[in-house]
Structures are given as structure tokens and as C-alpha cells.
Amino acid sequence: MNSKKIVALHMTSIVFLMIFFPLFCNPFAMQKVRLGYLQSDLHQLAAFVALEKGFFQHEGLNITIGGIFKAGPEEMTAFASRDLDVGYVGEAPATVAVANKVADVKIVAQVNLEGSAIVVRRGSGITSLKDLVDKTAAVPGYAQVQDFLLRKALFQYNIPSKSVNVIIIKPPEMIPTLQTKQIDAFVAWEPYPAKAITKGIGEVLMYSGQIWPRHPCCVVVVDTQFLGKHPDVVRGLLRAHVKATHFIRENFEQASTIGTKYTGMDLETVKLAMKNIVYEFVPDEEGLLEYVTFLNRLGNIKVEDPGEFVKKIIDVTHLNRVLKE
């Protein structure tokens, strides 16, 4: 065999190994994972960072975007029809969907704490919660975290919740609706409060951290059947999620630039919004218990034992294993 054929054979072998060696070492490399997340939601920056920096790919995950949703209930409907395997979504819609047996998922990690705000129109004369009496405020959906935050704030200031006209508007439509004076206030997740500020349309009446310090918000949920069949895949995803969360904490500038790409917001808005968000991966069981108890009291869900429900919906087994590696 001449030298050219030998070189060609060696090159073919190298290319073969480059393509297929990772598959031999990583048994779930070809496992397709259908991922969902919320539209322009900066809370879910860890997902965007993991996608952009190749953290999912590094774990051998074949991530496909199964859906980008305007609100959490829409995403949970996709889980109900088995169109998603994994999702970055609000803890509230996930909880309601499981409690009402609409979807069967487990919370496997936290995504963020805080990160919402009550926003009023600039120049409206609304300077306190009491000024919202007889006014109209928009929330993304009833029984969602933002709805709870508004109710909790009103309760803290002894203001009857029925004294405020609360309606549902999807966050992408909140700022123009506020600008045209169809509503007097809205409660939304970032970056919508920050965008209202940078556009000169709104101002923050109260940040969610002032209402409920370090309150839980978005989580990573996994379809229960998928979790049972592919625990190694889920641990790979959690490794990527933890790595992305650390990246955000340690690389504010790079992370904010990635945030602009996935939210479509300008850099000034993204940086302002990120300062209102705590990026965290360890689930807050006590916070979820408070929320479940609230939903139970309102009648949005019917759970005999909120404590037992929280223990069943949260599964930190795989996250704990990843953190010990």
C-alpha cells in the first residue's frame, strides 16, 4: 500500500472517530429532547445561555425547540399533549397543571427567584398601592405568580383585592396597552417591567422582591414518563442548567448580550432587568408550599395535604446527584 493510501486511510479513521467516538462514550447522545420555554422571558436566561454556549450539546443532548409560548398555561397544555419533554416555565402554571391533573411533570430544578414588578404608567399619579383602588391592573393569568404577588401586596396593605379590577393580558401586549391607557398598571416578569422603564412609558411601583423576598418563580420541569425512561438524559440537562446558571452569575456582560438575542430587547433593558432577577437552580420547597397553600385557599386547586403535594411534585434526586459529582 503506497503512502498516499495509508494517509487517506488514517484520515478516514480519524474522521470516523471524531464523529462516532462521542456516541460510544455518551449513550444518550442521540436522544432527542423537546424543550419548551416562554417567549422573551429573561427569567429563563439559563436555557438561552446553555443553548448559545453549547452546554446542552457538550452533554450530548440533541435539543430541539418544541415550542416558544406566550404564557405558562399554554406551555403546560403542550405537556398535556406530550409535545414536550422538558420545559422552562413558571412554577405556578406547572403546579396548577399537576394539581388539576392536566399534565404530569416533576420540578427538577429552580430557574430563578424574584424578577417581577408592579408597573404603572409614568405620570399617572399612582404612587402607592392604595392608588390602585378602582383602577385596572393586568396580570399574565389568574393563579400565576404575578397574580399572587399582586394579591399578596394588596393584603399586606389591607386593601381588598376586589377593589382592583384585575384582567388578563399576555406580557408582550402589556406595555402598549398601558401606553394607550386601557389599563392603569400591570404585573409581569422581566424584561417587560424594565422595557416599560427604558421606553419611558412606565415606572415600577413595587418590585416583587419587596413584596415577597426571594420568592420562587420559574422552574425546570420534566415529563414524568420521560424522566422515568431517561434519567441520564435529565442529569445531563441539569449539568448544563447548573453550568449556565453559574455562567450568568460570573459573566454579566456576556450573559446580558445573549439575553438580547433571545428576548429581542435592547442591551440597556436587559441589563436593567437582570438586576431584578436572582438566578438559582436549587428548588425552594418552602416558597412553593406557601404558594400551594394560597392556591388551595382560593380554590384554584384542591389538594388535601399541601406539604405532601410539594414533596411529590419536586424531585431533586437528580440535581443532588449532579451537584455531588
Image (tube, grey):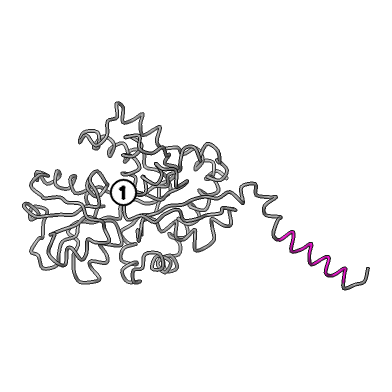
Q: Nearer the viewer, residue 96 or 215?
A: 96
**Residue 267 belongs to the span the image colors magenta:** no
Residue 253 as seen in the image, left or right of residue 5: left
Q: Quadrant of the C terminus?
A: top right
Q: Position of residue 155 (x, y in %)?
A: 14, 43
Residue 36 as seen in the image, left or right of residue 240: left
Q: Residue at x 41, y 59 (%)?
A: 45
Q: Position of residue 285 (x, y in %)?
A: 36, 38
Q: Residue at x 24, y 61 (%)?
A: 173
Q: Amino acid at mark 1?
A: Arg
Q: Nearer the viewer, residue 197 or 99?
A: 99
Q: Which residues are magenta?
A: 5-18
Q: Nearer the viewer, residue 213 or 105?
A: 105
Considering every residue shown, the one lying at the far right of the view is: 1
User: Vertical placement of 59 versus 295: above or below?
Assistant: below
Q: Nearer the viewer, residue 130 or 166?
A: 166
Circle 1 — which element? loop
Q: Pointer 1: residues within 10 angstroms few (<14), some, or many (20+)?
A: some
Q: Main secondary structure of the magenta part?
A: helix
User: How many marks on residues?
Assistant: 1
Considering every residue shown, the one lying at the far bottom of the view is: 4
Residue behind mark 1? 214
Please tell me in which quadrant of the rendered image residue 10 appears: bottom right
Please tell me in which quadrant of the rendered image residue 40 appears: bottom left
Q: Residue at x 36, y 54 (%)?
A: 69
